[in-house]
Image (cartoon, rainbow, N blue to C red):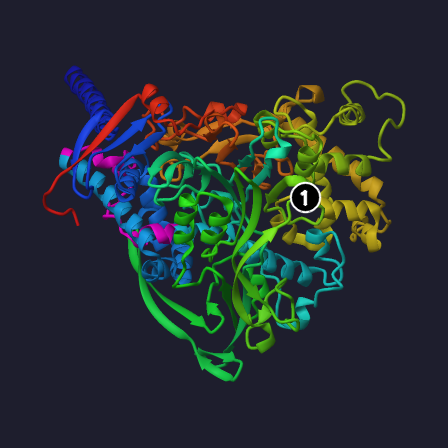
Amino acid sequence: MLTLFRWLLRLTIGLIVLLVVAAILAWYFAVRSLPDYNATLRVQGISAPVEIVRTTENVPHIFGQTDEDVFFALGLAHAQDRLFQMTLLRRAAQGRLSEVYGAGAFPADDLARRLELYRNAAASVESQDQATQAALRAYSEGVNQWIAQVNKGALGRGAPEFFVLPQEIAYWQPADSLAILKLLAAATSNSAAEEILRARLSLTWPDRGTEVLTGEGSAALPRYADLFPGARLAPPEARRGDPPARDAAGFLRPNQGLGANAFAAGADRTAAGGALLANDPQGPLIAPSLYYLARLQLTPGGVIGATIPGLPVIFSGRNPQLAWGIAPAAVDDADIAIEEVQPGQADRYRGAEGWTEFATRREVIRVLDEPARAVVLRSTRNGPLVPLLDPGLADVTPLGYVPALRWTGLSATDTTMSALIGLMRATDADSAATALGRVVAPAMAVTLADTDGIRQVTVGALPQRPASHPTGGAMPVPGWLPEGEWSGLVPVTQDSPTPGNLALATEERGPLGLRRARLSHLLNDREVHSRDSFIAAQLDIVSPAARALLPLVGADLWFTGEPAAPGTPDRQRQDALNLLAEWDGAMSEHLPEPLIYSAWMAALQDRLIRDELGPLADDIRSLHPGFIDSVFRNRNGAAAWCDIVQSARVEDCTTIARQALDRAILDLTQRFGPDVTSWRWGDAHQARHVHPGLGRIPALGWIVNLSQSISGGAFTVSHTGMLGAGPDPFEAATGPGYRGVYDLADPDSSVFVISTGQSGHPLSRHYDDLAGLWRRGEYIGMSLDPGLARAAATGITRLEPWVGPSVE
């Protein structure tokens, strides 16, 4: 017995030692992948020495003698800090995520292959101008040289994620960058998703269903059931799944719908006598951020701002003479065409001139730990078949039909990259607008500011629909109808008016335009602006939706009855209403009122639509203030939504409002306790920056994911999109991954920040060092002064030319 005990003890000690050794080895190899920013590297692909000067926040300032050398160094810097992110974005565009994530990513791969993101990107390389092709080649060589340095020096495979996830690191190609830009364009659009939801609402309640989205009646639209008599809602279990913000790719997914604010003031509206511009592109909150700060010293001058790893472009930023900010344009750039399959002939569909064969190709998608899957990809004259584009497509596609997608991004001659490269080199708003004329997808509202003033242009491919179009692009259309086709795509470079020498753009499409109205108020409320006033506007957390809805919804509930006994539900309701009555609408993380308001409106909307829409109500994840406004004002009889169909009595809207408030208070009490005054918005409104590679692994998620409470909401200028479902419906899933404010009167006082840190390495001190600043609404300086960059340098990487065997 004693001998057995000794052997068990030895075995236990041995296992502990092995675990310790394994942990030490894992740490050692992970640390090996941290780049040395103070190094001299001999690399192939540059014509002269290049310096990458990194500031205390790890922002690279790149100095070279040619533009190609500078783009080379940007590629190398991106790969040093974000190699895993770059390869993951590339896989998402290629349709190869399943090789890393397994079967859960197969739908994303299937869709990427159907959209031909990579095929069209590869075909578009030759359509770029010579300067852009040179930039793409140089950038690719820079990425590849860092991969070669990693292999040569055994630098931990370049990122610790590569030890956990089975992934080979292929060398970078110019088409890879164009494919990521295609993926970004696909993620920016959500026109198809809106069409599908509108059709589902029409199927559920033909007379009034679409009011949920528009706040207006459905008379202008045909009934979807009249277009497709065989359309039926699919069973609820066929549509359920995780909220879309938590998809496997983590970064970008087609049909997502990205956002941004961009606004500017001309010199005569600023205290310092120079134009001001602010921009905050919004997307999924991930770790690391989608954005990466960088400064490039190009031939026309320095340029600084936000890049996306994988792309040699400053998306939002400035040079000495010009500043620019980008927001998605309010353009309906996609349509769903429902194609009829010939009975008994699955390879043929009904075209305008009769039955026609699908264009077909076959591809193989490799899946981790499973056999590879062969997929048959079909397309029609209207576009590729996309059955997995949206879960709701099952509802709007009758038996014997298949959905196809028309989208402006389905172009094999897309010159958007050339437009963005040209924008960086522009020296004034006119030359910038000319360069932007080559944008295809996504359509953009670009705000420009130079020493002469401000300008706003809408650019991109604009679909042309005939006046006889059956749905006007608002719902899916029969694919065989000639009048349902696009008559063409028109490249548009359209100037927008800038009244009062002020300009603003948001992606908001709601009928009330609440966020846009709030931003317009902030800009017009003062005659003279400063950098600080623009920062204050960018960080504004007052909810115009709360200010509009609370007086309306609570009109008959304020201060009614005698004070209730402490500790009772009636007293909780009174306390909640008293707090809301004195609230100014500021969605501060430190207050209880935003939480009460948000829970109340969510419960109210659900109570209004649940009995009419049934399980479809689960898919209405965001608040629609225009709908609630119409219901409580009884526009066109919209108060009919307040009556519960299943009950014998006729409920009025006041009753529904009170019941919804009681429901919300009950739910909040279960989560945060009975004391209404102790609740805090920040307890529920957390920004979870999830690492798409390691964030879902329990042992590693708590290391690589970042969580912090934040202010703001869905309708504040400081915009955050919430999950809207699950146990944490108010968790912030999207937000401004980048903020920048550019002051042309004193350019070096311009500021910017990203939501995490510059490095994608979880063990780097730059992994999350900017997250606290971002949360508190603080910024770091944006200077083009080489002396300031070198004075604050924490590392200088020197690249020297070396002639040797190619890494290709």
Question: Could you say which is closer to the camera, residue 774 or residue 399?
Answer: 774
- Neighbour tally class for label 1: few under 14, some 14-19, many 20 plus, Cα within 10 Å: few
Q: Is residue 167 magenta?
A: yes
Q: Quadrant of the N terminus?
A: top left
> In the image, is residue 156 above or below residue 176?
above
**Is 705 a magenta residue?**
no
Q: Is residue 429 left or right of residue 601?
A: left
Residue 655, horizontal then vertical, whole percent:
83, 40
Q: Which residues are magenta?
A: 153-180
Which residue: 46% across, 73% down? 380
Q: Quadrant of residue 792?
A: top left
- Residue sitting nearer the eye, 781 or 367: 781
Rendering coords of residue 563 (x, y %): 86, 21
- Residue extending furthest toward the bottom: 354
The residue that disc 1 covers is 499
Query: SS class of the residue under badge 1?
Result: helix
Residue 113: x %, y % from top left: 38, 60
Left/right placement of residue 573 relative to residue 285 reads: right
Q: Is residue 564 left or right of residue 596?
A: right
Give the residue at the far top of this rendering: 2
Residue 558 in the image: state x and y as whole percent.
85, 29
Is residue 530 shown above or below 508? Answer: above
- Kindly identify the residue that appears in the image at 55 percent across and 70 percent down: 486
Among the 4 quarters of the image, the one containing residue 800: top left
**Image position of 430 with respect to 201: above or below:** above
The residue drawn where x is 53% and y is 23% is 776
- Judged from this view, the residue extending furthest toward the front is 452
For badge 1, the amino acid type reads: Pro
Task: Compare residues 540 and 67 and report the one nearer the observer.
Answer: 67
